[in-house]
Image: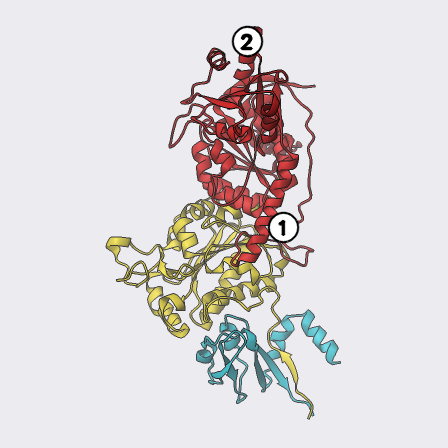
Chain colours: A cyan, B red, C yellow
Amino acid sequence: MKERFKNLLHENKMCYRRFHLIRPLLYQVKILEDGCKGCQLCVHVCPKHLLKLSSRTNERGYFIVEWEDMGCIGCGLCYVICPEQTIRIYAKIENG
Amino acid sequence: MDRWYLTGNEAIVEGALRAGLNAFFSYPITPANEIIETFAKKYFEDRERERRGEKPFYPEFKVFLQMESEIASINAVMGGAAAGFRVMTSSSSPGISLKTEGISYLAACELPCVIVNIMRGGPGLGSIQPEQSDYFQAVKGGGHGDYKLIVLAPSSAKEMFEYTIMLFNLTDKYRNPGMLLADGYLGQMKESFEVPDVKIEKYEKPWAVTGMGDRETQNVIESLYLIPEPMIEAKKRLFEKYKQIEANEVRYETYKADDAKILIAAYGTCSRVAKEAIDIARENGIKVGLIRPITLWPFPYKIFVDFTTHQVDRILVVEMSFGQFVEDVRLGVEGRAEVKLFACYGGILPTEEEILKKIREFS
Amino acid sequence: MRAPFLIPKYPEPETYLGHTHYCPGCGHGILHKILGEVIDELGIRKKVIMIEPIGCSVIALNYLKVDGIQGPHGRAPAIATAIKRLRPESIVITYQGDGDLAAIGTNEIIHAANRGELFTVIFINNAVYGMTGGQMAPTTIIGQKTTTTPTGRSTIYSGYPLKICELLDTLEAPVYLERVSLHDVEHIFKTKAAIRKAILKQIEKRGFSLVEVLSNCPTNWKMSPEESWEFVKNEMTKYFPLKLFRDK
């Protein structure tokens, strides 16, 4: 069931947009750490101030940005502005 | 067998169309104007035929464009060659100087194409009279970096036709740009000749930039290497290729040289005059012969070595510049024979009497 | 409690794969990303041929997975002319910087635009020569300090900034000319729409299209990424107004 749903989403890319119009309330943001360069454009653009520069560095030596799970509205502004395409946004559906 | 009566420039056009030329990009310059004008005539005649619903004469000749400069022409040739088509451009000495950056890129990216140089007087704006003073530019460089062009030097309208087709075959086979080195006399002189039967070879181009289509990997034509190791690999690959061409594609012609004690070395128009002079000299008892290199690169050093080891001890070099081709002859001879230069420049062709006088002085 | 089920909001990109050498916060990354998204959405990745400039994005084809060729400085429109005329079914996109297009390549771009060639030009303008260390460009604004104008660009020595969209607007043949910017998310969306329209003009065989994108150079402007986008928004748009010049 999960696999069929995933295939359906993958084949019809517009499903992503239509599904998210239902506005599920919980979102998760993942930052692919080895791509982040710490430019902080996402930090400045987030309307809920959930992103900040951490004190960790990645393999390339940049200080990377980390995300705090405190009421993300899934607006996607961080995804749009990141030059390295290291941000991934997911709708979170809790199980159990 | 057909017989044609054409100028050298028109013969180049016929040769290119026979070889299946796909695109021609150029800019007008004297003395190569007839090439671009003949191509334009044939291209638009074919478009008229298509408009009337008839089949075009040259269905493979898809694109003709007069570009805004010589530089734009050589870059358009680069685009066409990268896309996997047979492309050509034509110019004269000042225009070839403009193209040398593009020629260096073409050689580095290993793109096949044909560049026609109808030489005229130089340096600078020079004159519109013929000369042979672009030898260094064609054979020894011109553009920056370590590269070589395959250079062929015709000496008649028939050879302009034949060598154009040969150059398309050679450049596609080895993935290297090539140059046809003629001069203003050959371009403008009208001759009748029997059309030779030249084999047209076609080669596959899996490296061409066509849009990924069914391929999984991208084809990128690049010549930038930011770190030394890939640059060394790329240059080694180029040099292996050049060694292969030097081993297999040397071409030259000898004329009455088997029992000669003096040799004349000349290429292009000068070799035709030299042949006449040799006939007259032989009638007067002087044993003289001719070596005519057909490929200026790869240069036929070995034939000079062979002749000067046992047989010949004097070589007279006849060329229309103040001494460029003579340096390669000296390299081939390596001091085994005496080399003298008869330089004729400014647009004046050497006559048979003048060459005969020099032979008599030398013998 | 089992792990939550995650549904991605955006499809995984196919053309642009990130992991670049560009400086942090550079507009090239954002523009590559948008170009990749437009190519993915239109489904034309297998038909695109891209011509890289000389400049910071000289190895753009390492990050954008399409066929392409790296041409000499400024000559991309001549290369694109040949490729598009010989392979009319491919989508030809040239990606050029301000030195490439407005300095050495003015001859090629004006004549290609004048002939109405059917390719798309993406002109990214950041008012300096980035790769070579921040020298003056034709589009450097008056008073801007660069390494070859250490006291600020003055009109007496170096003339005025060149406005390419306005220049090409005097020609008959181009069908789509727009100037956009990347300084905030609203304008990034507008840039994406402009690039999409420009590529559709090529697919529909209408004519020559050019999109000028104002971008930043935090390293050579000696600013942080955030400050550099403020500079683009406040100072560059005074000389280079964002507008749609032509949409035939």
Q: Nearer the viewer, residue B156 or B32?
A: B156
Q: Residue furthest left?
A: C156
Sooner in the amino-acid sequence: mark 1 or mark 2: 1
Q: Position of residue C176 (x, y in %)?
A: 47, 54
- Which picture quadrant has residue B194? top right
Label 2 sits on residue: B280
Taking the image as drawn, is residue C232 in sight? yes
User: Residue B108: x percent and y percent?
Assistant: 55, 47
Q: Residue at x 64, y 40 (%)?
A: B244
Q: Is residue C117 above or below residue A96?
A: above
In depth, the one of C82 and C202 nearer the eye is C82
Q: Give the amino acid type for the residue marked by disc 2 in the picture.
A: Ile
Mark 1 vs 2: CB contact within 8 A: no
Residue A18: x, y in percent?
62, 75
- Residue type at numbered disc 1: Thr
Q: Tell me where residue A61 appears, x and y as whole percent.
A: 50, 75
Look at discs 1 and 2 and give the one toward the viewer. Answer: 2
Query: Considering the numbered disc 2 on the image, is that residue within a helix, a strand or a loop?
Result: helix
- Label 2: few (<14), some or many (≥20) within 10 Å? some
**How many residues crowd mark 1 within 10 Å: few (<14), some (14–19), many (20+)?**
many
Which chain is disc 2 placed on?
A: B
Viewed as shown, does residue B29 lie left or right of B106?
left
The chain ID associated with circle 1 is B
Q: Quadrant of residue C128?
A: bottom left
> Quarter of the image containing the N terminus of chain B?
top right
Going by the picture, which residue comes out furthest to the top?
A: B284
Label 1 residue SS: loop
Q: Are marks 1 and 2 on the same chain?
A: yes
Residue B59 makes an appearance in the image: no
Return the mark for residue B137: none
Q: CA distance from mark 1 to mark 2?
A: 58 Å
Residue highlighted by disc 1: B210
